[in-house]
Amino acid sequence: MNEPLLRLYIAGNSAISRRAEQNLSRLQELIKPQGWEAEVVDVLAQPERAEHARILATPTLSYEHPVRPRRIVGDLSDTKSVLDFLGIELKRDTA
Amino acid sequence: MTEQDLDGATVLERVKTGVNAFDELVMGGLPRARTTVVGGTPGSGKTVFATQFIANGITTHSENGVLVTFEEPPADIEANMRSFGWELARWRRQGRLAFVDASPPSSDEMVAGDFDLAALLSRIQHAVKTVGAKRVVLDSLTQLFDHFIGDPKILRRELFHISSALKKAGLTVLMTAERNSEYGEITRHRLEEFVADNVVILRNVLHREKRRRTIEVLKMRGSHHAEGETPFTLLENQGVVAVPLSSLRLEQQSSMVRVTSGNPSIDEMCGGGFFRDSVTLVSGATGTGKTLLVTNFLAGGVAAGEKALLFGYEESKGQLFRNATGWGVDFAQMESEGNLKIICLYPEAQSLPDHLLTIQALVDEFQPSRIAIDSLSALERIASDIGFREFLISLTSFIKKREIAGLCTATSKSLVGGESVSEQHISTLTDSIILLRYIQEKETMHRGLMVLKMRGSEHAKEIRRFTIDGAGMHLGEPFREAPNVFTGGDAAPNH
């Protein structure tokens, strides 16, 4: 198993958390061919993981890059700005 | 659990902060299961106050705490607070304290769209559960607003939610927030409006080159609190120490027991000596004999089997000893026998509230029956008018409360007559006033002494001439035609 590169921190079943999860699923469809893995962490169920990663806001998408870690706070509805921020270029046919 | 009184109304249980005088201002402490916002400019002592609240819970009330830090990482807080005597790291290892590290992470961050702070709340609740906390501090909210700078509305909603959730769990919450100015809006982002049941303001005002720290309770929902600013100081190994103006209640008992002034003639003029729990002011120009009166006061007490304490702010210990020897008093022997203690300090060595605490600490330790302060004028130099007045109120009330006889000196500016500023301040606060004045008669200058005021007693009204020699002070005959001792003007009959 690959270490997941993207982690989405959500809080239980709130509307905004579900929206973020859905948006992440769409995003995954786009980036999976390039080998990106994603994991969802529920901070209500696993507060110690939120503590360890020092997450304040939910939803937060964390890109666990060893040199330059990046985080996006929000519901991930703007796919383009998410990809831009993560620095992921999509192959032309999937864009 | 909250208590119920006879009317069925909820009585707010109090949580002590560890700042004793502050707890008195708010009827015993912060209301349990409520949120208090502590506002202050940078450097006003918010973090110290907040940490003290946690530390006091852990050390004296078996109430564990959670510290949510938005500004500095926990390791820095642990290091910074060590000088106040708080072993945060040890308490953390013992499971009595938990940190929630909400300091800015190193990663890049972008905010796009709506969000909530459920992760923060979940972390706080997790920490509370882990150590069984009763007290929670969030320090400081302003940092959180800076973090999510574009979304103040969301933060207000979320902080309200966090505050409600913690209160519902019975936690007493203290949040700090920054202020832009000492006397402007209450906090930046107006946090107090949506999150606080109670609002406390810490101030650190620079007035005429002198710092003055105060604490003020602005709002206490559902209960009474004292109004106005109370001075405080930050002390090593103690943290915030507020200085109460307790004499405003005027509840000291008045003793009728007389003690000697150290000079039989002055005792006689005062109707038999000073009262046991009274404060006497000796006012006079430089060289009129104030320090001699102090010396007699101390020696008279020691001779009567009392312990005496002197705080000198004008002369060194060596000088005081030399002076005393010149008047036939052996301070060195009294001190070696443990009946006398002399402390000499530069007024500038510390702030006025610190001086007061030094005096109080030594009185508690040495347990004297009489105390002398020489001089108030030297202390007046280092404080603002209001600061000095507060110091005097606290000092005189403290002396009376301990049923100690107090003698303070003040130096008047002009050589003949004239009031010193300290005198204006203190005259209403002291029980007795003795004036020492230079009085000119034709071509010679004499010294004169009069008892201006003696609360609760008859006293001599005349101005007595006196001389000073190797055996001390000798009172002579009254002046027949003395000039006005207050203005130093031409000779006029004394009224």
Image (tube, coloured by chain):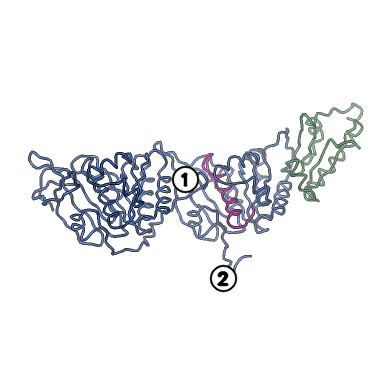
* In contact (CB < 8 Å): disc 1 and disc 2: no
| Subunit of label 2 | B
Mark 1 vs mark 2, foreground winner is 1
Q: What separation in Å lies between label 1 and label 2 (alpha carbons)?
A: 37 Å
The reply, left or right, for residue B6 in relation to residue B227 is right
Q: Position of residue B146 (x, y in %)?
A: 63, 38
Other residues around mark 1 within 10 Å, as few (<14) / some (14–19) / many (≥20): many
Residue at image x 56%, y 70%?
B5
The range drawn in magenta is B39-64
The subunit letter for the residue under badge 1 reads: B
The answer to which of B448 and B272 lies nearer the viewer is B272
B60 in magenta: yes
In the drawing, what numbered circle is on residue A94? none
Disc 1: which residue: B233
Q: Earlier in the sequence, mark 1 or mark 2?
A: 2
Chain A tint as drawn:
green
Residue depicted at 87% across the width and 39% down the height: A26
Mark 2, residues whose alpha carbon is within 10 Å: few (<14), some, or many (≥20)? few
Left of B419 or right of it: where is A86?
A: right
Q: Which image quadrant for residue A35?
A: top right
Is B257 above or below relative to A80?
below
**Which residue occupies the extreme bottom position in the image?**
B6
Task: Respond whether the residues carrying marks 1 and 2 are from the same subunit.
Answer: yes
Q: Please, what secondary structure does the residue beneath circle 1 have?
A: strand
Residue B345, given in percent of the width and then of the height, sits at 37, 41
Which is nearer the eye, B459 or B364? Answer: B364
Colour given to chain B in the rendered image:
blue
- Image quadrant holding the N terminus of chain B, namely bottom right
Name the kind of residue labelled 1 in the image. Thr
Q: Amino acid at mark 2?
A: Asp
Residue B5, numbered circle: 2
